[in-house]
Image (cartoon, grey):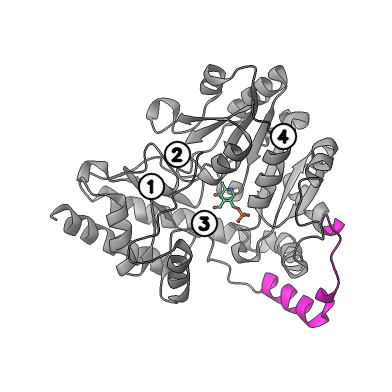
Amino acid sequence: MNKPEKIPPKGHDSKNKFFNSVFADKEMIWMGQNTNHLHEHDFIADAMVKCVESKEYCKYPPPEGFPYLQKLILKDLDLEEMDILVTAGGTESLYVCISELIKKHNNVITCDPGYLIIDEFASRFSNEIRSIPIYNEECGYKLTPELVKQNIDENTKLIILIDPLNPLGTAYTEKEIKEFAQIAKENDIYLLHDITYKDFAREHFSVAKYAPDHSITIFSFSKIYGMAGLRIGAVISTPEIIDATRSELINDLGTNLISQAGAIAALESKPKWIESIVNTTRNNQKLIKTAVDSIDDIHIVAYPSDGNMFAIDIEKTGIDPVALANYLLKKKIFARQGVYTSKQFGDKYLRVSFSIPEEQVKIFCKELPLAIEKLKNK
Ligand SMILES: Cc1ncc(COP(=O)(O)O)c(C=O)c1O
């Protein structure tokens, strides 16, 4: 089984207690979960407060999401002709699709590094997860159509494309998306396009545009919309696939009504905040790049990132990424050791996210060289 890292972090008897203590520390700089801390306006909060005040939460919402919210999501993606299910986040979307599509004899193609929760879900239903190593320049640090062709066979049912990729921030070109679409159509298999970070990317191309009948698009409100704690997302596909996934749903009585009110406001207000959030995020990654470039033996794996995160390779320093993450945590900076997103290359890098205020990024830039210096000499 492709189980994600389950060992409790040092000094904590469970992962939950660890996260609780990080969460409780109000001074903690949040670079460990690719969340977005840059929303300055109150559009989303105000809509939710209004919803709470209406006390309409005593009713169940429509089970597949408010049609107005569904319409707004499809409009945002320019996929108005497709079907949609509102879920309690990208995570639920991933689970219902994978559980519906995959049988034991099917294999699933994913990549390493990648978002390991997807591999773990797939391994509950399939006997074989083909996790392709992509931590190299040759493939551009992403799963390529060529790599997929080399690894596909008659039992392949699903190809996972995380675009941009958590943790490296690499994204697909239009040419690559068209080639993937072609592969899916020729082999009659599905492309699961996880677009959780798409709005941070310089360019984004939708698999659903080129292979609508073979695409499953995973949508999240956790990142650019800054709503991770509200647990809301969606899955977009053909009416047949959406219909089939309904039978896998546990949340049969619908997704949190207050979160849906926030999500509607988030999409309606998007033109008012998107540019400033993306610009700050891009500028932040430049600041970190300058800091990283000034330190011997470390580098950013793929730059620039099309996400709100990237990986800093520290292999040459001999420092264990877990030790670096623990050191930074003591300085009140929460970042993630590589093993969280890679089984094969987790000992090489630290992942940091940077959709946080610039002053916090500057603190990280000041602490990073001190941390490397200190841990190198241990
Ligand atoms: C690629 C990817 N998909 C899905 C998720 C989870 O999304 P959600 O918070 O909407 O469940 C994450 C969270 O980090 C992610 O990186």
Residue at the spot of label 3: 279
Secondary structure beneath dot 4 equals helix
How many C-alpha atoms fall within 10 Å of the one at disc 1: few (<14), some, or many (≥20)? Answer: many
Secondary structure beneath dot 3 equals helix
Between disc 1 and disc 3, the foreground one is 1
Residue at the spot of label 2: 113
Going from N to C along the chain, the mark reached first, 4 or 2, is 4
Going from N to C along the chain, the mark reached first, 1 or 4, is 4
Query: Taking 279 as reference, is 160 left or right?
Result: right
How many C-alpha atoms fall within 10 Å of the one at disc 3: few (<14), some, or many (≥20)? Answer: few
Q: CA distance from mark 3 to mark 2?
A: 26 Å
How many C-alpha atoms fall within 10 Å of the one at disc 2: few (<14), some, or many (≥20)? Answer: many
Q: Is mark 3 within 8 Å of ligand 1?
A: no
- 49 in the magenta segment: yes
Residue at the spot of label 4: 101
Q: Assess whether mark 3 and mark 1 are in contact (beta carbons under 8 angstroms).
A: no
Q: Assess whether mark 3 and mark 4 are in contact (beta carbons under 8 angstroms).
A: no
- 20 in the magenta segment: no
Q: Assess whether mark 2 and mark 1 are in contact (beta carbons under 8 angstroms).
A: yes
Q: For the residue marked with disc 1, what is the amino acid?
A: Gly
Q: Quadrant of residue 155?
A: top right
Going from N to C along the chain, the mark reached first, 1 or 2, is 2
Residue at the spot of label 1: 338
Expressed as whole percent of the image width and height from the top left, the position of residue 303 reads 41, 42
Q: Is mark 2 within 8 Å of ligand 1?
A: no
| Frontmost residue, 336 versus 292 | 336
Q: CA distance from mark 4 to mark 2?
A: 23 Å
Between disc 4 and disc 2, the foreground one is 4
Q: Assess whether mark 4 and mark 1 are in contact (beta carbons under 8 angstroms).
A: no
